[in-house]
Amino acid sequence: MHFHNFLYNYGRPKRIFFLRINKRPGPSSFKKRVYSPKWEMHLNREIVSIGPFYFNNLLFNMKKHGKKYNQAVSLVEADRQYTLVEAVDLLERTNTVKFDPTIEVHFNLNIDPRQADQMVRATITLPNGTGKTKKIGAFTDLGNEKELLAAGVVVAGGDDLIDLVLQGKIEFDIAIATPGMMKKMGKVAKVLGPKGLMPNPKAGTVGEDLLAIANEINKGRFEFKNDKQGNVHSIVGKLSFGSDKLKENIAYFVNTLKASRPSGLKGGASFIDSVYLCNAMGPGIRLDMNSL
């Protein structure tokens, strides 16, 4: 929620502190506080101290979308489900940026993410790649650092690389490791884990043949998994790929996700509730699942 207009109209406090969002089942527990020597504001489905009049003004003055975005939204019918061909065509027409935007796909799944047997997690290599390259860090105890660096790995090592990570020098976007090094990486788990960089056998980033793993990642292999709300968010390429490559990537991703249906989901229950496509900073376009 944007407070800029409200603060300029009704007095700007000296300091603003933003509290974390507590995600819990049931009603939203979103909290944000604005501290000032003279007044204090709390938002948690109730109005305290500022009163309903100022709160309504706050909502009215929230930041609105620009002209380009509104024009793009007008091209998409909110209640319509588009075929894959129509949706990819709309991606070009709803582009609002000057750079080459990344194409995103968003799935709403009919799963309970709190149940271990309904989790969705898999790896995928799109037929035409994602258009992005990742910096790979390899933790190896096989003495093949030179071969890994020649294969495109940014940094490779054993205990020395662990020491660099402990010093805060992380120069990679994804980490791979041999099973022997995983035994030693417990001390860097607290550093790499929160960043999502810890190697994991389920993600295909742990193995004896790191050269093969690095080559697959360079070809565009990546991992996708559901979030806490039971959604899957990912990328399927760049707008510059063209319609044919984008359609191939999107169809391949949908089929891969269908094959990842969790065992805990009942046989008669639907797995994918809805699928949306969009480009960077563009509106969502709902896909017709029957067209895939």
Image (tube, helix red, strand yellow):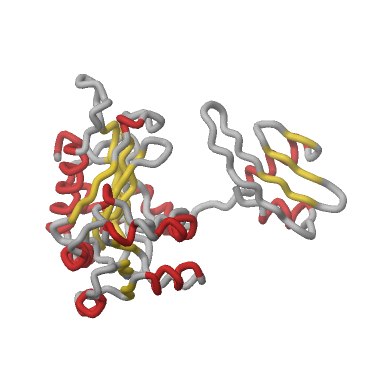
Query: In the shown orientation, is residue 123 left or right of residue 97?
Result: left
Instruction: Evaluate whether residue 172 shows in this view.
Output: yes
Image: 192 above or below 6: below
In this figure, what is the number of numbered marks?
A: 0
- Which residue corresponds to the image point at 22% horizontal and 33% vertical from the top-left? 261
- Which residue corresponds to the image point at 42% horizontal and 59% vertical from the top-left? 68
**Which residue extends farthest right?**
38
Image: 59 above or below 2: above
- Which residue corresponds to the image point at 29% horizontal and 62% vertical from the top-left? 176
Give residue 244's quadrant in the image.
bottom left
Query: In the shown orientation, is residue 268 left or right of residue 108?
Result: left
- Quarter of the image with the C terminus is top left
Q: Point out residue 262 in the picture as x, y percentages from the top left corner.
A: 25, 32
| 282 or 121: nearer the viewer | 121
Q: Point out residue 109 in the picture as x, y percentages from the top left corner.
A: 31, 34
Q: Point out residue 206 in the picture as x, y percentages from the top left corner.
A: 26, 56
Instruction: Evaluate whether residue 85 shows in this view.
Output: no
